[in-house]
């Protein structure tokens, strides 16, 4: 297995003099597993959420390294442990600093276990040439961050915003596509709105590796939807087009080349973008 990760700052943050609020990490464990994780700090709160995004990625890495069985349970159970570890790693007093999302994956011998807290996306590339992309978005772009549970007033306010929504505040979309000759053909698409309870502490996804062999897995922040004018799945298709024999830093090169290509056409990446990937 090979792993790599990379983050870039969005044009909007450059213009506003803000730091990159995304973070990413990846690695191999001695027991044969691999992990990849990305996080996106909220840019609309009064805090330095680049701190929080770094710390939640570190918390995720610590948990999956220490106990391989943790990702075998529910998203809620894992999310509770992640909250505890995330709080233990706080290095500043401002609670706003920790309003951040997380998308992570652990590659096990028989399956992939993805976890999403907040928004973001993950993609699985199969040996038959198809890629399955799952993305999670929230009503009014207002995710329920894990740190919100630490503030009773904010928790109540956010729940009040979500409460009138009959189908819930979370839009979950899964599509499978096939990329060929510069085109992207969508094979299947499923979309639904989900209740807060399903994502309150994050959601776990299971992808078997034996039905159709998996060749790559990647996690991405929602900045993938802000690169140029193409649909996000077309950007993902570009990002997932790895070489057969990738060099070190393959994710860094892939993200940089996609952003450069679109930037040359005046289609700048407006939001920060992170990607972490495992080649299997």
Image: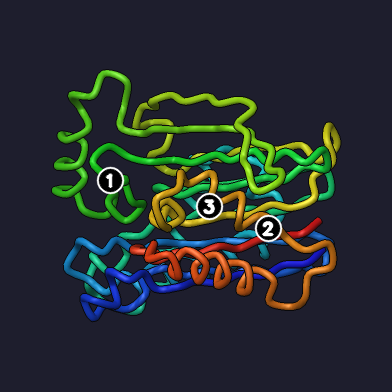
- Tell me if mark 3 has few (under 14), some (14-19) or many (20+) residues whose alpha carbon lies within 10 angstroms of its own: many
Identify the disc placed on residue 141: 1
Real-space CA distance between mark 2 and mark 1, rounded to the nearest whole angstrom: 33 Å
Q: Is residue 232 rendered to the left or right of residue 131? A: left
Where, by quadrant of the figure, is residue 189 drawn? Answer: top right
Q: Is residue 163 rendered to the left or right of residue 37? A: left
Image mark count: 3
Say which of marks 3 and 1 sits in front. 3
Location of residue 140 with respect to 162 vertically, above or below: below
Q: Quadrant of the N terminus?
A: bottom right
Identify the disc placed on residue 67: 2
Residue at image location 57% in from the left, 51% down from the top = 236
**Residue 83 makes an appearance in the image:** no
Q: Residue 58 at x, y = what percent?
A: 52, 70
Residue identified by numbered label 3: 235
- Outermost residue toward the top in this view: 166
Real-space CA distance between mark 3 and mark 2, rounded to the nearest whole angstrom: 34 Å
Real-space CA distance between mark 3 and mark 1, rounded to the nearest whole angstrom: 20 Å
User: Under tag 2, what secondary structure?
Assistant: loop
Residue at image location 43% in from the left, 31% down from the top = 198
Q: Residue 145 at x, y = what percent?
A: 33, 51
Q: Earlier in the sequence, mark 3 or mark 1?
A: 1
Q: Nearer the viewer, residue 209 or 147?
A: 209
């Amino acid at each position: 297995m090979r792993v790599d990760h990379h983050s870039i700052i969005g044009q909007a943050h450059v213009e506003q003099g803000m730091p990159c609020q995304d973070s990413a990490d990846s690695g191999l464990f001695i027991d044969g597993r691999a992990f990849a994780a990305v996080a996106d700090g909220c840019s609309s709160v009064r805090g330095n959420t680049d701190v929080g995004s770094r710390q939640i990625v570190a918390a995720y890495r610590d948990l999956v390294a220490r106990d391989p069985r943790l990702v075998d349970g529910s998203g809620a159970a894992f999310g509770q442990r992640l909250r505890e570890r995330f709080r233990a790693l706080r290095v500043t007093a401002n609670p706003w600093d920790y309003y951040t999302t997380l998308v992570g994956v652990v590659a096990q011998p028989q399956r992939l276990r993805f976890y999403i807290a907040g928004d973001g996306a993950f993609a699985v590339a199969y040996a038959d040439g198809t890629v399955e992309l799952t993305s999670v978005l929230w009503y009014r772009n207002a995710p329920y961050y894990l740190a919100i549970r630490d503030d009773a007033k904010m928790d109540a306010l956010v729940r009040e915003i979500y409460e009138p929504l009959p189908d819930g505040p979370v839009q979950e979309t899964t599509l499978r596509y096939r990329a060929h000759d510069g085109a992207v053909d969508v094979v299947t698409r499923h979309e639904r709105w989900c209740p807060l309870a399903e994502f309150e502490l994050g959601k776990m996804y299971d992808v078997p590796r034996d039905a159709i062999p998996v060749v790559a897995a990647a996690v991405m922040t929602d900045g993938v939807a802000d690169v140029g004018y193409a649909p996000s799945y077309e950007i993902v298709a570009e990002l997932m087009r790895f070489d057969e024999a990738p060099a070190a830093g393959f994710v860094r090169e892939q993200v940089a080349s996609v952003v450069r290509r679109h930037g040359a056409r005046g289609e700048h990446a407006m939001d920060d973008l992170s990607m972490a990937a495992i080649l299997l």
